[in-house]
Amino acid sequence: MYLGLDLGTSGVKALLIDAGQTVIGSGHASLDVSRLHPGWSEQNPDDWIRACEEAVADLKARHPREFAAVKGIGLSGHMHGATLLDAADKVLRPCILWNDTRSHAEAAVLDADPRFRALTGNIVFPGFTAPKLAWVKNNEPAVFAEVAKVLLPKDFLRLWLTGEHISEMSDSAGTSWLDVGKRRWSADLLAATSLDEKQMPSLVEGTQKAGALRADLASKWGIPAGIPIAGGAGDNAASACGMGTVGASHAFVSLGTSGVLFAANASYLPNPASAVHTFCHALPNTWHQMGVILSATDSLNWLSEITGKSAGELTAELGDTLKAPSGVSFLPYLSGERTPYNDSAIRGAFTGLAHESSRAVLTQAVLEGVAFAFRDSLEALATAGTTLTRVTAIGGGSRSRYWLKAIATALQLPVDIPADGDFGAAFGAARLGLIAATGADPLQICTAPRTDATIEPDAALGGVYAEAYQHYRALYPAIKVTTA
């Protein structure tokens, strides 16, 4: 048996698979986010440990015999978080999360240094780790002076599991300190934020062993000590391993809290001007690119809170047949946007509202707005040298067939729906745990699930969707002026 532990923003998931990669079961525990000020987003790392223990206990209670046979563990987690430890590995302050934008000024300063884009292949986004450390230095100098180690969230769980400071390439690529082409820390980029390599974890590939389970924790869980812990992956790369998105131009569209259009690459293809993320993949000598939308299902959840109707009730009102755009447009910039604008200050908007704009019309506009944001990412990927011929849909929002029809028509690409199963980040983490424990060929393990159905673009609505997308594109500069 192999265990995948996925540290998400809203909870920890523990998933168990057997040697044939059949999912045996899972456990879950919830997490909360603290937002003390506008643009802030933090979590207490000790809560991650509590949630991990609860998720494992939940899984173990459901499948005690199978859990006792665990032979390898893989890790996945939300990226970019700044987890700061002193020399005794004590947490110095709450972790600043991926969707925290307080360090926008520091990010702009670092991004103006040409070395960052040249070595990382990316814009320095406010959500990345390096500008957060610059913010701590500027605003909490006493804390910064005590920083002995900077860990990413899943690697803080690794420290608890193994006692070792280790990270891997896919997650570390989102810090703005990694030389992404050479897959190693950059001394120059670390020095630009008054840090050095001694304050960073050591690096492995996501498929490699990265520590072993501590004896006391193994005894508590009833499994052998010394079980290998895989390097693992950042959440999107782990999801790609779960979906088999590891070959060149294989791609998925993820409709989660945030939205991701993810494409695997056989070589390093940076193009930071496009605001596409170019990161190392979890597999050796593999990279990936992705466009990122900060509010995907979050946009529908926001409308749900406003209307008092669940997300499922809202989408059900639209029926199954894709409709032509109504003239009401929605820009999903509720917490800023990454691809293609790198704009933490921009905010969302409805335009074209009229007396006859019903709740269903607003829901339709929200789904179309997110679909058009994915089209923005598709265009950015093309600029960065990646052409897609189809995508696979994952994430909670992919349960809405109407939304997938809108995405297929906006992208003008077929959207594949995988057969029922759990192919997300926890499954990808478990696969990496299997590879690290057995030495199996990653390409033989990280295969794609069977396609249950394919949604083709609606040919009859392709033209009006293209017109609506051009209208959508024209709105950003207009609202940027009013929100600047």
Image (cartoon, rainbow, N blue to C red):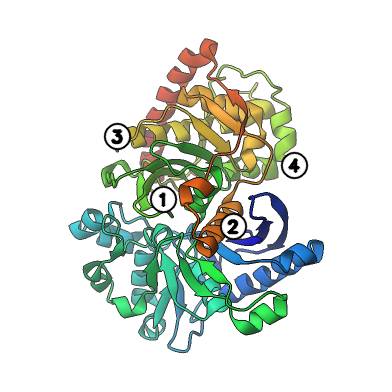
Residue 396, compared with residue 75, is above or below; it is above
Q: Residues within 10 Å of mark 3 (few under 14, many from 20)?
A: some
- 327 vs 388, nearest the viewer: 388
Task: Give the amino acid type for the residue marked by disc 1 in the picture.
Answer: Ala
State the CA–CA distance, disc 1 to disc 4.
28 Å
Disc 3, SS: helix
Sequence-first disc among 1 and 4 = 4
Q: Which residue is mark 1?
A: 345
Q: How far apart in space, not on screen, are marks 3 and 2 (Cα)?
A: 34 Å
> Tag 2 or tag 1, which sits nearer the N-term?
1
Q: Earlier in the sequence, mark 1 or mark 3?
A: 1
Kindly report the distance in space between the C-alpha atoms of the residues bearing marks 1 and 2: 37 Å
Inspect the image, locate mark 4, and give the three-letter code of the amino acid beneath it: Gly
Residue identified by numbered label 2 = 430
Q: In the image, residue 305 lies at what x, y percent? A: 69, 45
Residue depth check, mark 1 versus mark 2: number of the one nearer the observer: 2
Please tell me the numbered disc located at residue 308.
4
